[in-house]
């Protein structure tokens, strides 16, 4: 099973659905936005979709997804979602969450 | 284990991991807001407060430990608050409002432009600032101040206020300056000393050369006397002796013998005066006083040069070597007067000093000279006489004192211990 999921072919086809929860223009939220955008453009060309939710405006959405802190990145998966909390300055942390191969 | 338990375990582990992530994120300062059941709470205020509380605590501690004062600047309104200690450090009034221009006025004119620039920048940049500069108190006294300041931002990222910690570092600066000055003088002294030693070494080397030269000249003089004079006389005597063989008459022979006798007398006279000059027997037999008396006689006869002697018997050295030394020194001083002073008489005094010393004084009323030339003189024209006296006296714990000025004569005093102790 794992052999299959790590095959180059499969990786090419994988599509990522992100929801980034932020709090207005707070510094860490801005930072998370910027970091996520950079990562997607550099490593996931055309294979991603980002939805940004400002919890100050859309509180219900945050509650629905059990978001406790902002910024939080939600990586949506068929089986279960993965959460990454923080400003995403640590690129390796997201790469690990996305199961991207080590550089 | 059934499936249910396994699921529960996995669920539990996942929750645990999530909780851990949340704690970590909170600790890391990477989050902005907490989303609770009913609202969103921004963390920033708390953070700022925390930061402020911490820096306040730092300040309090610093105030306790060092002589630190604080300065608070509300950047938007320009209002300044200063602690008592800060006011003391700047020499500002201990009560009432403080303005920027008041503070700048205390700063030393040389440091003011930079500090003034800094004040105009507080609004624009939040960079930390550290600087040591001088302030002048109303009483005119100068003080060294060190400042460390930091700016804090508001929600919009604008500089909100700036806090400065101010310390009086005058004492530290004085010590630093003293150390620097001390090092400089030390360096200067070492340089001077090195230069002195170098000059002395050069001088000594030149004098050593001169000494060999003097010895060489003396040998040449002796061999000249032996060759030109003594040998001539002896050769003449032998020649005349040979001519006797050819004489037939007693009268003739008598005449030649008379000539030979005359020539030999001359030879004896020459050798005697040479020996006298080198080491007068009067010195050996009559000590220093006897030697000087003979010298007076000798110089009167040969050079028509007069020595006025004033000799104290009690000053007569116990040691024959000392007598010879002083005699030779005296002769050099008298010769100097003959050569340089343009006089035909000198006064020579020998006396005993209270502190078990002998003083030998040679004085003339001649042209005089500046004794400084002896030490200032450069190597090429190094002279030997006075230097040699100085060296020989120093060797036995004595000294030479020269009092002279161009136009007012020369008095040279030699001081040596009564007995050389050797
Ligand atoms: N009595 C004096 N009156 C005037 N000048 C003197 C007298 N004694 C010494 N000087 C000056 O001091 C200089 C140094 O004297 P010093 O005896 O060392 O050397 P010198 O007599 O010139 O040479 P020497 O090496 O043959 O003695 C002299 O050249 C002279 O200029
Ligand atoms: Mg001389």
Image (tube, helix red, strand yellow):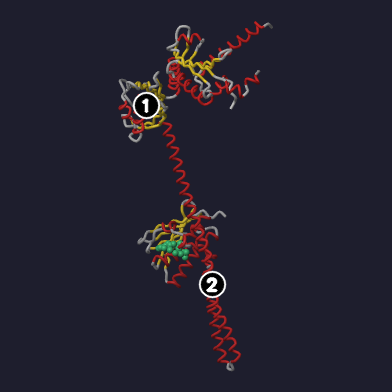
Report helix, strand or loop for mark 2.
Answer: helix
Q: Between B111 and A32, which is closer to the camera in this rendering?
A: A32
Q: Name the residue furthest bottom.
A: B248
Whether residues under marks 1 and 2 lie with C-beta atoms below 8 angstroms apart, the answer is no
Q: Which mark is residue B222?
A: 2
- Residue B366, by quadrant, is bottom left
- Mark 2 residue's CB less than 8 Å from ligand 1: no
Residue B69 is situated, as x and y percent measured from the top left of the image, at 39, 23
Residue B149 is situated, as x and y percent measured from the top left of the image, at 41, 26
In the picture provided, is B131 more to the left or to the right than A4? left
Which residue appears at 60% of the width and 21% of the height?
A10
Residue B253 is situated, as x and y percent measured from the top left of the image, at 57, 90
* Chain where mark 1 sits: B
- Image quadrant holding the N terminus of chain B, namely top right
Above or below, comparing residue B304 to residue A13 in the picture: below
Ligand 1 in which quarter: bottom left
Other residues around mark 1 within 10 Å, as few (<14) / some (14–19) / many (≥20): few
* Chain where mark 2 sits: B
Q: Between A50 and B35, which is closer to the camera in this rendering?
A: A50
In the picture provided, is A3 more to the left or to the right than B422? right
In the picture provided, is B339 more to the left or to the right than A39? left
- Residue B347, by quadrant, is bottom left
Is residue B355 something one can see in this rendering? yes
């Amino acid at each position: 099973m794992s052999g299959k999921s790590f095959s180059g072919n499969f990786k090419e086809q994988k599509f990522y659905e992100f929801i980034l929860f932020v709090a207005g223009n707070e510094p860490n939220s801005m930072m998370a936005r910027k970091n996520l955008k950079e990562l997607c453009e550099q490593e996931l060309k055309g294979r991603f979709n980002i939805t940004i939710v400002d919890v100050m405006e859309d509180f219900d959405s945050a509650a629905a997804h059990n978001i406790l802190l902002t910024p939080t990145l939600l990586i949506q998966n068929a089986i279960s979602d993965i959460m990454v909390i923080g400003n995403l300055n640590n690129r390796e942390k997201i790469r690990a969450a996305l199961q991207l191969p080590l550089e | 284990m059934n499936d249910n338990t396994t699921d529960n375990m996995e669920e539990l582990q996942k929750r645990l991991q999530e909780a851990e992530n949340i704690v970590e994120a909170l600790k890391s300062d990477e989050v902005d807001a907490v989303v609770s059941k009913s609202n969103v709470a921004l963390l920033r205020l708390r953070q700022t407060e925390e930061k402020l509380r911490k820096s306040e605590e730092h300040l309090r501690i610093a105030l306790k430990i060092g002589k630190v004062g604080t300065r608070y600047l509300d950047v938007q309104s320009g209002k300044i608050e200063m602690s008592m200690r800060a006011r003391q450090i700047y020499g500002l009034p201990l009560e009432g409002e403080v303005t920027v221009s008041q503070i700048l006025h205390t700063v030393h004119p040389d440091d003011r432009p930079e500090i003034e620039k800094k004040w105009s920048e507080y609004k624009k940049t939040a960079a930390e600032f550290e600087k040591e500069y001088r302030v002048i108190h109303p009483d005119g006294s100068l003080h060294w101040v060190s400042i460390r300041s930091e700016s804090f931002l508001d929600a919009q990222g604008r500089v909100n206020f700036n806090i400065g910690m101010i310390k009086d570092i005058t004492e530290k600066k004085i010590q630093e300056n003293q150390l620097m000055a001390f090092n400089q003088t030390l360096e200067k002294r070492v340089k001077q000393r090195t230069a002195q030693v170098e000059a002395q070494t050069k001088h000594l080397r030149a004098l050593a050369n001169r000494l060999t030269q003097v010895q060489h000249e003396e040998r040449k003089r002796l061999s000249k006397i032996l060759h030109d004079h003594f040998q001539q006389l002896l050769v003449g005597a032998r020649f005349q002796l040979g001519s006797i063989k050819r004489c037939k008459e007693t009268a003739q022979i008598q005449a030649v013998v008379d000539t030979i006798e005359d020539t030999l007398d001359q030879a004896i006279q020459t050798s005697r005066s040479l020996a006298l000059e080198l080491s007068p027997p009067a010195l050996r037999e009559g000590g220093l006083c006897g030697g000087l008396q003979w010298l007076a006689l000798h110089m009167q006869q040969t050079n028509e040069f007069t020595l006025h002697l004033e000799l104290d018997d009690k000053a007569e050295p116990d040691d024959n070597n000392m007598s010879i030394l002083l005699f030779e020194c005296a002769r050099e001083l008298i010769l100097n007067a003959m050569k340089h002073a343009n006089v035909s008489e000198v006064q020579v005094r020998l006396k005993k000093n209270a502190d078990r010393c002998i003083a030998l004084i040679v004085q003339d009323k001649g042209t005089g000279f500046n004794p400084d030339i002896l030490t200032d003189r450069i190597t090429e024209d190094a002279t030997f006489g006075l230097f040699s006296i100085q060296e020989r006296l120093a060797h036995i714990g004595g000294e030479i004192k020269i009092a002279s000025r161009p136009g007012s004569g020369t008095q040279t005093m030699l001081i040596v211990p009564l007995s050389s102790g050797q």
